[in-house]
Image (cartoon, rainbow, N blue to C red):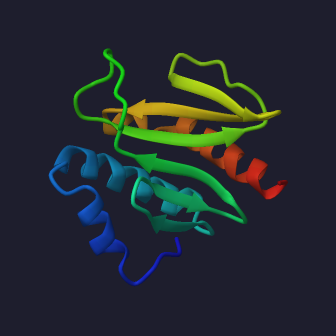
Amino acid sequence: MEHSAFYEGDVLAYFQGNPLELALYQALYARMDRELPESRVKVQKSQISFYGRHLFAAASLPVRRKKDWPEHCLLVTFGLSYRLEDPRIAVAVEPYPNRWTHHVVVSREEEIDGQLLGWLREARDFARCK
């Protein structure tokens, strides 16, 4: 996966004081690097963004945590043309007609599975059509 020369330091700075979330992100990145290697990744102030032709997904530390969310978790966000109905979707919003933003709470490495990677792949393909 393509990234800047400062990527590793930027990731460590983003997750400073959050070692459990860093480990979850590293597992997510490793899976995405294997399965979506043509993507680019960019560390930003509020999230780590994944791009194909356009932004298709992000990983972030939850800012507004819901009561039932785990204390240590990573929020994985992606966009699709439809609202995905699945118990793993913590929040789904439609900021534009036929553009749904989905948020999945990941608190264990096992949750970075084929289903989540399938959604990320679908999001990348949807972003290509924008």
- Image-quadrant location for residue 106: top left
- Residue 126: image location, x then y, percent: 77, 48
- Residue nearest the viewer, comparing 19 with 13: 13
Q: Tell me how many marks there are.
A: 0
> Percent position (x, y) of residue 2?
53, 75
Give x and y (percent) for residue 19. 18, 50
Instruction: Tell me: 27 left or right of 23.
Output: right
Residue at x 78%, y 36% (from the top left corner)? 81
Q: In this view, does 19 lie to the left or right of 55?
A: left
Instruction: Determine if residue 36 is in view.
Output: yes
- In which quadrant of the rendered image does the C terminus lie? bottom right
Pick the residue in front: 106 or 62: 62
Q: In this view, does 33 lie above or below 105?
A: below
Asked whether, in this view, residue 85 is left or right of residue 32, the answer is: right
Instruction: Indicate the position of residue 93 as horizontal and vertical percent values.
Output: 64, 28
- Can see residue 118? no
Task: Examine the image and state in which quarter residue 79 appears.
Answer: top right
Q: Which residue is drawn at 70% across and 61% down?
A: 54
Asked whether, in this view, residue 72 is left or right of residue 90, the answer is left
Residue at the (53%, 16%) spot, across then down? 87
Q: In which quarter of the image is residue 65?
A: top left
The residue located at (26%, 50%) in the rendering is: 23
Residue 19, above or below 102 = below
Considering every residue shown, the one lying at the far left of the view is 17
